[in-house]
Amino acid sequence: MASRTEIIKIPVDSAEFDKFLALFDRYRDALAQTPGQWKAAGKELEALATQANKLDTAFRQKKEVQAGEDDKDKERFRRLRDSDNLWTSMARSSSQMSKNVLDIGNSLLKWGNLLGGAALFGSLLSNS
């Protein structure tokens, strides 16, 4: 058998290792508690998702109501535009009619002058 003789003596300080072991034990204990914490976080996320779904539903309903109001506004605008076109057409027709009445009046005056002149000329000829 071989004899044991120390060649180099290495001092071992276990305080550093004990400190590391204590930290590692705290880490292991905290790690053991994480499933419960994850479960609690999951419940909170479910509650948050429920609230987000409610908010989304409310926004969608508001959007549908707004779309209905937009359709009503479009219909009102279409009716207003049709009414404006009608009044514009009536104004043009009235303007054209008044112009035609004035033209008829001018024509009657011209014919009246011509007929009056002819009557005067005829009366002069018949008196002579």
Image (cartoon, rainbow, N blue to C red):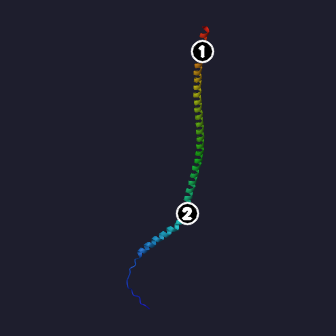
SS label for mark 1: helix
Q: Look at 57% across and 52% down and name the residue there.
A: 56
Q: Position of residue 21 (x, y in %)?
A: 45, 73
- Disc 1 residue type? Ala
* Quadrant the N terminus occupies: bottom left
- Disc 2 residue type? Lys
Q: Look at 56% across and 56% down and name the residue there.
A: 49
Q: Position of residue 40 (x, y in %)?
A: 54, 61
Q: Position of residue 9 (x, y in %)?
A: 38, 82
Q: Residue 4 occupies which quadrant of the picture?
A: bottom left
Q: Residues within 10 Å of mark 1 (few under 14, many from 20)?
A: few
CB atoms at circles 1 and 2 under 8 Å apart?
no
In this rendering, the answer to whether 3 lies above or below 127 is below
- Closest to the observer, 69 or 121: 121
Q: Residue 15 occupies which quadrant of the picture?
A: bottom left
Q: Residues within 10 Å of mark 2 (few under 14, many from 20)?
A: few
- Closest to the observer, 41 or 65: 65
* Quadrant the C terminus occupies: top right
The Cα atoms of the two marked residues, 1 and 2, are separated by: 116 Å
Q: In the visual, does 31 lie left or right of 112? A: left
Q: Residue furthest top?
A: 128
Q: Which residue is mark 2?
A: 39
SS label for mark 2: helix
Camera-nearest label, 1 or 2: 1
Q: In the visual, does 3 lie left or right of 51? A: left
Q: Which residue is mark 1?
A: 118
- Closest to the observer, 50 or 97: 97
